[in-house]
Each structure stands twice: as structure tokens, then as C-alpha cells.
Amino acid sequence: MGLRSFIKKQFIDAIEWDWQDDDVLMWKFPMADNEIQNGASLTVRDGQVAVFINEGQIADVFTAGRYELTTETLPVMTNLRNWRMGFDSPFKSDVLFFSTRLQQGRKWGTTQPVTVRDSDFGMVRLRAFGMYSYKINDVTQFYQTITGMNDSYRAEQIEPQLRNLIVSDLASGLGQSQVPFIDLAANQGLMADEIKKELQPDFAKYGLSVESFVVENVSLPVELQKTLDKRISMGMIGDMDAYTRYQAAEAIEHAAKNEGGMAGIGAGLGVGMNMGQVMSEAMAPKAQPQQHSQSAAAPEAAPIDFTAKLSQLKALLDQGLISQEDYDETKTKILTQLSK
């Protein structure tokens, strides 16, 4: 190299990344034809990792802090370049900065219905969408599998691939879950946990980790949605006796507003208070007969008046104390007992 060329060459004495764009995941420090001076300063901010690359191979990795570049702070580079006795002259090396900050508020969703295998319903087709967040967890893996020696790499370049992974793992994650799908759909937090668990190994292949995963909405087929709504409603009813008292109180308020004032409350209340007994007996399991000794005769059970029970049930429906679905289900159970 001639003296004039040597004088024109710039020697780098400060290396840092003052990022302004959180969507940039990797940035290559501009070297051009310049060389790094012995004892140069390296500044790595919080949420960054700096990596020195020697002929395409990862050498030294620096987390947050300020460093003076010497043979002591560049042990791998020193070994690769055979600086056994130290170095006094500038050297060439590529320096990559990676952002390890959390990438928040990323959206995911199914463009087409996804088929999920379920133990209760067989195959279920659904649509879903939500949010997730991730970050670079292993810069070496991310460099080797994703970025390479690009000048920069942005989140928008990898996120279409991540969304495809989410949709793919949605079906397998829910299908492998031991929890029935209808219970997962009623608890979207539990569903999100199952999907996140399935995503972690696939994200790790790129040097990423899933930090949060949220299911905001699940769209189900109409028939399955009705079943889910009914199960949620029954869970909200809980104690049938308490539900009966609540419905009776509602009947009093309703009757007071109707023609005839409080005159019809007694009949409505009497029928309403029988609802718990009618529905509880209809849904209760049939008692098993007990074994008796030959000396003790078992008393005969009183016959069940199915006609009265059906009449009471119909009265509950007519007064709006139970829904049509509750009526149909309980009526079926009463008729089933009648046929035994």
C-alpha cells in the first residue's frame, strides 16, 4: 500500500449502534475499507448484543457495556488471527449488532379455517386471531439461520414466516392437548398456553423465544358454538337451588308489571319453586337397588307421577322461567326414566 493510500484510510476508534428504529433486529456496522484501531472503544447499549465476525465465522460476542478492544477483550479473535504476542496495528473485522429487545404487539390470525382434531367432536374447523411477542434469545443461532452478513434485517422480513408457524402449530398444539377442545375454547388463556408451548421449539430453531401469546377470538361452527354457549350457561347457573330462587324472584317482578298486578304471583311462585325439584330429579342418576336380607323386606318406592312433572315443566316454560333448551333437555330425561 502506498503512503498516500495509507494516509487516506480511516481508522475506526469508536464502534456503537445508536438505533432509532425498534423494528430493526440486526444492523451491520459500516466498515467500508476501514480498519479497527487497536484499543478502539466498543459501546453496547441495553437490549443490544455486538458480534465480531472473522471471515464469516463468529468470533467474540459482547453484551451491554463499554469495552476497550485489545487482545484481552478479543480472545477468540486473537486466537483466530494468531495474535500470540498481541497486536499493535489496525485490523479488519465485521461487527454486527443485534436487538434483543421485546418485539411487542405482533398480530397473528388464520386466513382460512384450521382443522383441529378433538376427542369429543372428532374434527373441528375454526378461525382464530390474537397477539404475540417475541425476542432474539440466541444471536448465534439467529445469525446462522436467518440474517447472515446482510447490512440489516428487519422484523417484517421474518414475521410472515412466524405467523405461518403459529397457524401450523395451532392445529397440532390443540390436537395434542389432553384438554377437550370445548373447554379450551371456553378458556382462551388455557388455549393460548397450549399453543405457546407448541411454538417454543420452532421459534428456538431461529434463535427466538415466544415471550407472550394471546388468543383474542375464536370463531367456531354454529353447531359447536351453541354447545359451547350452553355449557358456559350451565356453568354460570351452578347451584340449581340458587338458580330457582333467582328465577322465582324474577317471576315476582315480572308478574307485578303485568295485568292483574300481584294476583298471579302465587301461582307463578308455586310453580317456580318446584323447578329445582323437577329438573334435579330428572337429571339425577338412577339409584341402584340395595341388597336386603331375606328377613327384612324392602319398602316399595313411591311411584313417580311423570304426568305431573311434565305439566310442571311445561308451566315453567310457559312462564319464561326456563329456556326452550332447558325444557327440551329435561323433558327428554323424564321420558327416558318413564321408559325404564
Image (cartoon, grey):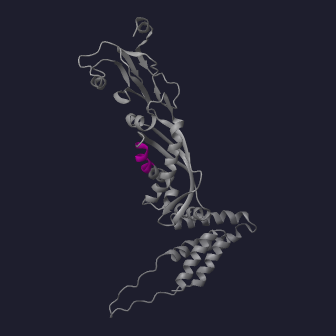
Residue at image position (67%, 70%) is 319
Residue 274 visible (yes or no):
no
Image location of residue 3, percent across then percent down: 40, 5
Nearer to the camera, 233 or 70:
70
Magenta highlight range: 196-204
Task: Choose top left, top right, bottom left or bottom right for residue 39.
Answer: top left
Residue at image position (49%, 57%) is 184
Nearer to the camera, 11 or 113:
11
What is the quadrant of the N terminus in the image? top left
Image location of residue 37, percent across then percent down: 37, 14
Image location of residue 165, percent across then percent down: 49, 48
Horizontal placement of 238 versus 50: left or right? right
Location of residue 323 with respect to 27 vertically, above or below: below
Residue 190 visible (yes or no):
yes
Nearer to the camera, 192 or 14:
14
Location of residue 210 with respect to 15 vertically, above or below: below
The secondary structure that most of the magenta stretch takes on is: helix
Task: Choose top left, top right, bottom left or bottom right for residue 10.
Answer: top left
Horizontal placement of 183 versus 314: left or right? left
